[in-house]
Amino acid sequence: MDLTEELPAGRSITGFNKWPLGNTPIVVVEHIRLMVDAGLIEGEAHPVGDMQNGGVFIIEGLTWKGHDFLDAARSDTVWNATKGRMAKAGSWTFGLVLEVLKEEAKRQLGLT
């Protein structure tokens, strides 16, 4: 999401020159759709079964919730502690991960 985080006001992303992390276009477009549905980014995505282009999407920027998630996950210490706690749970939801990230950040600040 760094590219999205640095997006100037009034600009949008509608494609990539290189697909992130070696994923196929359809996987990336589907993940963008999920991030829109989760309220992390503003935009829209319409995946299609064509493995060459993956569909169409537009990313207009991060939401407040998206910024909160990135800020909470930015510290390697907080992120690694969160991953350790989530591994113990066996299964989790995005909302739970965000809550644990916030708890770990508070713990690092000595607020708990």
Image: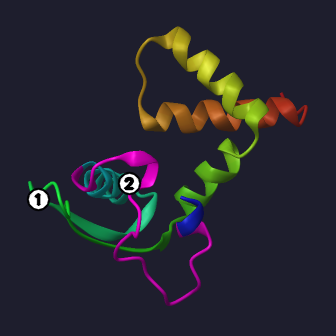
Cα separation between marks 2 and 1: 17 Å
Quarter of the image for residue 105 reads top right
Q: Say what secondary structure mark 2 lies in.
A: helix
Is 107 in front, or is 22?
22
Is 112 in front, or is 29?
29
> Residue at coordinates 34% horizontally, 57% vertically from top-left?
32
Quarter of the image for residue 3 reads bottom right
Residue 82, given in percent of the width and then of the height, sits at 64, 26
Q: Is residue 109 left or right of residue 47?
A: right
Q: Relative to 99, does residue 80 appear above or below in the rendering?
A: above
Residue 27 is tagged as none
Tell me where the magenta segment starts and ends, as one range.
4-26
Q: Amino acid at mark 1?
A: Val
- Of the image marks 2 and 1, the number of the one nearer the N terminus: 2
Label 2 packing within 10 angstroms: few (<14), some (14-19), many (20+): some
Overall secondary structure of the magenta stretch? loop
Q: Amino acid at mark 2?
A: Met
Q: Is residue 96 left or right of residue 81?
A: left
> Residue at coordinates 35% horizontally, 73% vertically from top-left?
15
